[in-house]
Each structure stands twice: as structure tokens, then as C-alpha cells.
Amino acid sequence: MKVLRLEKGLSATERGWVHGETFKDNVQELAEIRLELISVAWQGASGKKILALAEEHLPVLREYDADLYQEFQGIAQAAGLSEARLLVLNHYTDLRDMGNTKRALEEGCSILHARHGEEVLVAQTWDMHATAEPFCLMLFLPDEGVWVLTITGCLALCGLSSKGLAVTINNLVMGDARVGISWPTLVRKMLRAGSVAAAEQVLTESPVGSGHHYALVDPDSSRAWESSGSISALVYDGSRSPYVHTNHCLDAKMLELSRISPTSTTHHRYAQATDLLKENPRPNAEQLWEMMNCRINFPNSLFTDRTTEATPHGISTCARVLMDCRRREIWSRTGKDPEQVPLKFDWSTLG
């Protein structure tokens, strides 16, 4: 697991520059991997065609949040990439799905949430093409008071703020994808909001272009939304615990728009997480952390690795992360770390 703690007081461009310069080779390599994977998903489309679609997203990003756009520019400049190539790295699943209308590709990511007594916990596996695992990064943004799990070159995948606001995600493949805000930018903007209510307002007012499920949790409330290019639905209001979401829609109208790969394990993982939390509906952090490592019925399990020698880019649990919203701790490990005791990050470095 890579770790980067930025210094206080950096400008947006400086934040991006430090990130891009520190991991220049990694950013270039990952961008190339993802460009190639999108080409395969698009039945052999040229890089020129893919980058043209990526270019269409840049004005949306520029207008959406000038500060985050400048950080994005700084990463691209320091890493020696065009902004379109960095957009491919950040917005990979959405670009892939926009140009692949014939079939849905297999997805990952599972979210488990529990709220009871003093415990407010949300955990997520980040399942992606296995070749993304070496690029996993814990990034500390002291001026925002935010830790994010991400990959080199990407603004955020999920994270926790010093106010105890957690944002986690699942990808959803929807039939109405369009040009919109890159979802890692949206995650960062929601984490800056400071509370579930404020993050929810950011989400519902943002020009979302493609499918995702966003779980928003803070010490006082929990909400979760499924979104697509044209509609969205509140699927969880915090009135019950525990809560589980994988890669299929829970809302009926959203489900009508969705596409699920015939090889997807989303229903297997949903059932497994639901059963685990039925057996122990009031887990502590250690117990919830171990649930994410469940390998029953492997590889159709919460922790998975569906790669082979012939398919090195197959879906794998590249990382898992747990947010303890009351104690303000975020735990993480990459899937292939030989040691799986969680690395624990807090805000002591803000001191």
C-alpha cells in the first residue's frame, strides 16, 4: 500500500503536482493499462476515439469545481500526461461502459454498514482489474481533513473526513450513461461537505453522467443513493441497520435501466454479506473488517480473485477499507499484502 501525506497550505495545483511528480511512472503506467482495457471493451476501438470521449468530460470538470480541476491539472502536468489520458485513469469504468453497449462487464465492490450503540462503521471492498492493485494509495489531504483510498493519479475512490463523514461507492452499469462529472471528483467534493446532509445536497445537485451507488455515513446519519445519467433514487435512509449494497440496483426503476454481466457475482456477494450481518448484526470494527475477508464459495465471495494466467486483468479484491466514523479512523490494506492486519490512519498528523 502506497501512502502520501501532503503538506498543509498547498495550492490546488501544488497538491496535484506533488501527487503526480511522486508517482509519475505509476500514473503513466496505469493510464496506459486503462486505455488498453477500454479499447478491448470497445471491441478494439482506437486510443484516439477513446481520448476524444474523455476530452468531452474536461469542460464539465472545469466548470464543476475549479479547485479540484486545478489539482487534476497539476497531476497531469507533473506526470507528463494529457488531461484526457488522466481522465481515462480517473473515470475508467464509466468511459468503458459508455462505449460498450453490447454487454455489461463484470463488476466488483461490496459495501457493509452497521450502526449500533457507539459504533458507526462502514466497510468496502474495492474490486477492480487485478493489475490496478499495485497502484493503490492512501492519500492524506490535511487542509481538507480527509483521508482517501485511491490509486496513483486519481482524485479519490472513497474516504473519511476528520468530521467523521464517510463516502463509499459501488459501480452500476446503466443504459443511460452520458458525459458528466468524473465520479472521483464528486467523491472528493462530497467529502469536503462535512456531513451527510451537505454531501447529499452536493450529490443531488451535481451533473452525474453514469451509474454509481453512493453510501454516505457520519456519526449522526446514514443515506445511500443509486444514480445514473438521467435519474437517481434514495435506497437507504438510515432507519435500519445493517445495510448492504453490491453491484445491482435495489430500486425498481433504477433496475430497469441497469445491465448486469452474466458472470457477475453481485448477487452472491450481496447474499453472503447479508448472511454474515444477520449472524452478527452488531459487529465491532474488527469483526466487520474480517467479514470483508470472507472467502466462502470463493471466488464468488466478498474477497475475490478471479484472475488466471490467461486473464491477468481479471476482477480481484485490490483493496479493502473500513471507516470508523465515531473514532475518526480509516483502515486499509491492499488485497495482495502478505500482512492483512489493517493499517490504521487518523488525524494525528493534523496536529
Image: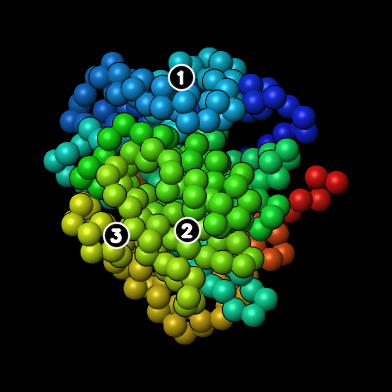
Q: Residue at x 17, y 39 (%)?
A: 101
Q: Which amino acid, mark 2?
A: Ala
Residue 124's disc is none
Q: Is residue 303 above or below residue 138?
A: below
Separation of residues labelled 2 and 3 (CA atoms): 14 Å
Q: Is residue 26 left or right of residue 138?
A: left
**Secondary structure beneath label 1:** helix
Q: Nearer the viewer, mark 2 or mark 1?
A: 2
Check the image and name the residue furthest to the bottom.
Answer: 279
Q: Is residue 216 above or below residue 291?
A: above
> How far across and how far down the image is residue 185, in percent?
50, 36
The foreground one among 232 and 44 is: 232
* Pointer 2 with pointer 1, Cβ within 8 A: no
Q: Residue at x 31, y 68 (%)?
A: 268
Query: In the rendered structure, which disc, 3 or 1, sits on the residue that comes first in sequence?
Result: 1
Mark 2: few/some/many CA within 10 Å (<14, 14-19, 20+): many
* Pointer 3 with pointer 1, Cβ within 8 A: no
Check the image and name the residue furthest to the left.
Answer: 102
Q: Is residue 337 left or right of residue 253?
A: right
Q: Nearer the viewer, mark 2 or mark 3?
A: 2
From the image, tell me which residue sits under label 3. 248
From the image, tell me which residue sits under label 1. 83
Residue 337, visible in the rendered structure: no
Residue 215's disc is 2
The foreground one among 36 and 183 is: 183
Q: Which amino acid, mark 1?
A: Glu
Q: Residue at x 69, y 66 (%)?
A: 326
**Secondary structure beneath label 2:** strand
Quarter of the figure that contains the N terminus: top right
> How far across and how far down the image is residue 333, in percent?
59, 53
Where residue 321 sits, quadrant-wise, is bottom right
